[in-house]
Every structure is written in structure tokens, then in C-alpha cells.
Image (cartoon, rainbow, N blue to C red):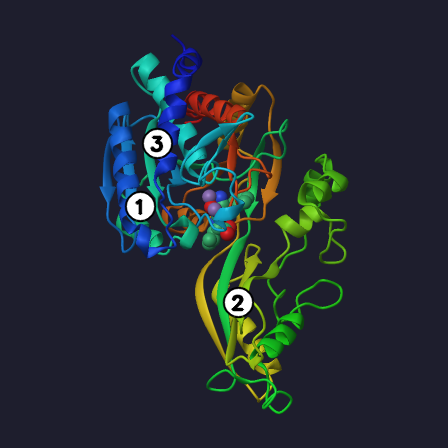
Amino acid sequence: MTPFAYLKNTEKQRLEELFTFLEFPSVSAKSEHKKDLNNCAKWLSAHLKKIGFTSKVMPTGGHPVVYAEYMVDKSKPTILYYGHYDVQPPEPLDLWKSQPFKPEVRAGYIYARGATDDKGQTFCHIKGLESVIKTTGTLPVNVKFLIEGEEETHSENLPKFIRKNKTMLKADIVVVSDTAQFSRTIPAVTFGLRGIASTEVFVYGPKRDVHSGSFGGAIANPVNVLCSMVAQLHKSDGSIAIPGFYSKVKKPTAWERKQFKKLPFKESAYKKALGISALHGEKGFTTLERSWIRPTLDVNGITGGYQGEGAKTIIPSYASCKITMRLVPDMDPKDICNKLEKFLKKIAPKSVRIKVDKHGGAKGVNVPTDGPWLDAAAEAIKIGFGVGPVFMKEGGSIPIVGDFKEILGLDTLLIGFGQNDDNIHSPNERFRIRDFERGCKTAAALPDTLAKVK
Ligand code: BES
Ligand code: MN
Ligand code: MN
């Protein structure tokens, strides 16, 4: 039997197993789910063992890592597959058509939190490799799996884990499927990701909420102040006003611009899919450039004052917001956070006190745009999808990819099986069954194409 025939024969069971994986509410951001993350890791490790891997759940300073190995021959290349079994919080729950941790198939899609990001995509590789092992009795390459539980919370403990386990993780190339294809008909290899710098800003006013009639007009309102400060972070041309923000940002290269221009991007379809009537962004850049290779600053959430039913006439005591900035390669997250803090403190009126908490960060990465590994990935995609990939970048971040290069000296192949409209981080996250199948096929073809490299 061929691996593809095996995949076909096991289609139903494969979907059921993915459903079991998706049923764990492995939300890394919330401490109440600690047990669920542990159980999910245990299930995953046991599943890898059933396929023929040696595997263990390994502790970190946070949620555990699932590690697995299938070693065949020292002279063959070693592939390190990375993925994450943790997921984003599912809220707001009332916007889900079916429950986030009760997977359901509707109109050719699997709906569940983690369906695409990243359980479904990681599972493609597990099942693709299984199809090769079960039909040929072995693999043409050595395989290592590193599947973590803290990607959605900045992979805070993983760099240390990698440093401690350098020998165990020794490999020739990393494979990650945690991105998207360009479109439903155009698969892609991604050659760069943006980084991220995360902060939370607090504005403190009077030591308690006070009557807005008695005190309004005489003291600063922290919510008003925060809004005004946030409004000053961008200039009217869409660029970011923080001094020095762009000092490390390189102009897009001619090659990059050419790749992007080749892609069949339709502004009208993009707007329609999002339900917006006009686009917005930095002057002088296309939409793809704005979302892939330019740094950004966004408020992810803002709070303060009374938000319950009816009216409450107060000047709130404090206000806060979460700000993340997407970075391009060479920008340093710490440096950018410091620059934001300095700017906010400079523009803040004396009437309030400002505190800026600096959370995790990750550098943007570029991965090679040519060479034998990339050719091998493109060949496997051609087999799995029936059509070769385009080259693109992505605006999202996978924090550990930069560390693979810095700590292990390894390049990464970013082979996305998802779609831009899979609703990742959003209600009704989904994975198209067709993409799951094509992902599994690509994953089944990849060991053979990679084996030819070394
Ligand atoms: N899979 C995404 C990264 C991604 C998103 C790549 C969209 C390409 C397109 C990943 O799970 C993710 O969401 N990363 C976070 C990292 C952050 C929490 C440090 C992100 O980008 O917000
Ligand atoms: Mn992901
Ligand atoms: Mn994610």
C-alpha cells in the first residue's frame, strides 16, 4: 500500500483522532486550564508512541513540551518538526455556532478552537509520517518532534528548554506548519514572519472613582487621557509617531516587492471578507507590504470606568490598555518597548500617573528564499497539493523560530496548510477538510523529498 492509499483508508479514524486532540481545552493563557494542557500533552505523547515514536512529556518552567523521536540512520538528514498544542482563549463564547471544544464538521470545515492554529496543522505531520511508517516500515529521514504548550503566550520557557537540550534537538532543518496558504488554490512557502513586542499601559487618576458632577472639569479623567495618548501614537500618514521606532527598519528589497506583486491579491475580495468598506494603513505601502513587512502598533483591548447596564456618572480612577507592536527583522522588542514607554511618559499630562508593563517579545525572522531544503519543501507541496507553492511572508509571529536559528543554528521551512479566513484567534475557528487532507499528503511526501538533500 502507498502512504496516500493508507491516508485514504484511514480518513474517518484520522478525523476522529483529530477531534480527540481538539477536545482538550488547552488554553495556555489561563491558569485554570493547567490540567487540560497536561492531559493534552500526555495524550499527544501516547499517540506518537502508538505510531512508533519514542516520546516523553518534558517539564519546562511552564506548560510541558511533548518530545518524540524516530531515528533511522545517522547518515540520513534529521528533521525537527515544531508545533504547538496550546490554543488561544475561545471567548467571546456567544459568537460560536458550535462549542469551541466540541469539534463539529459543517460544509467541509472542521470547527473548533485550535482546528488550524495549531493542532490541525501539527496533526498533518503526525499523520503524514504515520502513513509512511505504516506502509514502508520505516522513514527515509530521522525525525524529532518538539510540540510546545506556550506558543500563544510568547513561548516564554521554550528558549531555555532548547538551550538545555541542544544535543537532543540536534537536527539539519526545522519544519513548521503554523501559517497559511496564500489562497484556497495557491499553497505557499513563507520566507519571513514579523516579531512582536507586548505591553500593558496603565493610567492612574484619583485614588477612587469620584462623582463626575462634583469633580468633572477639575481633574483629569484617566479614560480621556488614555484615549488621547493612544491617538497620538500614529501620525496622519499612518506611520508610528514614537521617536526612533523605524531606526532599524529596512526598506523592502526589490526581490521582495516583485514576489508580492506577482501574487493575485484582490483588494475588493479582502475588504468583502472582512466586512469593511475601505482599507487603512501606512502611506506608500501596499496592503501585503503593510501586513507582512512593515512594523505596526495596535491596541488589543482597552478598559476603564463603568461598562455595566445603564448610566453611572463617574470619573474613573484608572484606565488601561494592552498594546502590541509587530516588528520586522532587526528590531529589538526590548528596545521598542522602552521607546514606547519613554514616549508615553513624555506625552502624558502631569495630572495622571503612568505605568507601562513590558511583557514578552520576539524578533521578526527571515528564512532562506532558496537552496535545496526549500526546493524539497516545494516538491512535497507540489505532490500534496497538485500545484507548486508561491513565496510569501506573514504578519503573525512564531516566537521560537528566531531562537532555532540563534540557539541551534537551524533554518526553518514554514509550510502553511491554513487559510486566511480560518478565523484563527477568533470565534468559529475552522480547518477546511480539504486542507487537512492536502496537508497530510504533503507531510507524507516531505520525508522523501527531504531525504534527497543530504
Ligand atoms: N500561528 C500563529 C502565527 C501566525 C499567525 C502566522 C498568522 C501566520 C499568520 C501563532 O500561533 C500566533 O498566533 N502567534 C502569536 C504569538 C504571540 C502570542 C507571541 C501572534 O502572532 O500573535
Ligand atoms: Mn500558531
Ligand atoms: Mn496563534
Given residues 338 and 280, the one toward you in this image is: 280
Q: Residue at x 56, y 26 (%)?
A: 107
| Label 2 vs 1, first from the N-terminus | 1
Structural crowding at the residue carrying mark 3, measured as other residues with C-alpha within 10 Å and reported as few (<14), some (14–19) or many (≥20): some
Structural crowding at the residue carrying mark 1, measured as other residues with C-alpha within 10 Å and reported as few (<14), some (14–19) or many (≥20): many
Q: Indicate left or right for 192 with 451 as reference.
A: right
Q: Amino acid at mark 1?
A: Leu
Q: Amino acid at mark 2?
A: Gly
Q: What x and y, as percent, mark residue 232?
A: 67, 73
Q: Indicate left or right for 161 with 213 as reference.
A: left
> The N terminus lies in which quarter of the figure?
top left
Q: What x and y, as percent, mark residue 442?
A: 48, 24
Name the image quarter holding residue 221: bottom right
**Which residue is the site of mark 1?**
37
Label 3 within 8 A of ligand 2 by Cβ: no
Q: Residue at x 59, y 84 (%)?
A: 212
Asked whether disc 1 touches disc 3, contact meaning CB atoms under 8 Å apart, the reply is no
Q: Tell us which disc is closer to us: 2 or 1.
A: 2
**Which residue is the site of mark 2?**
308
Q: CA distance from mark 2 to mark 1?
A: 33 Å
Residue 20 marker = 3
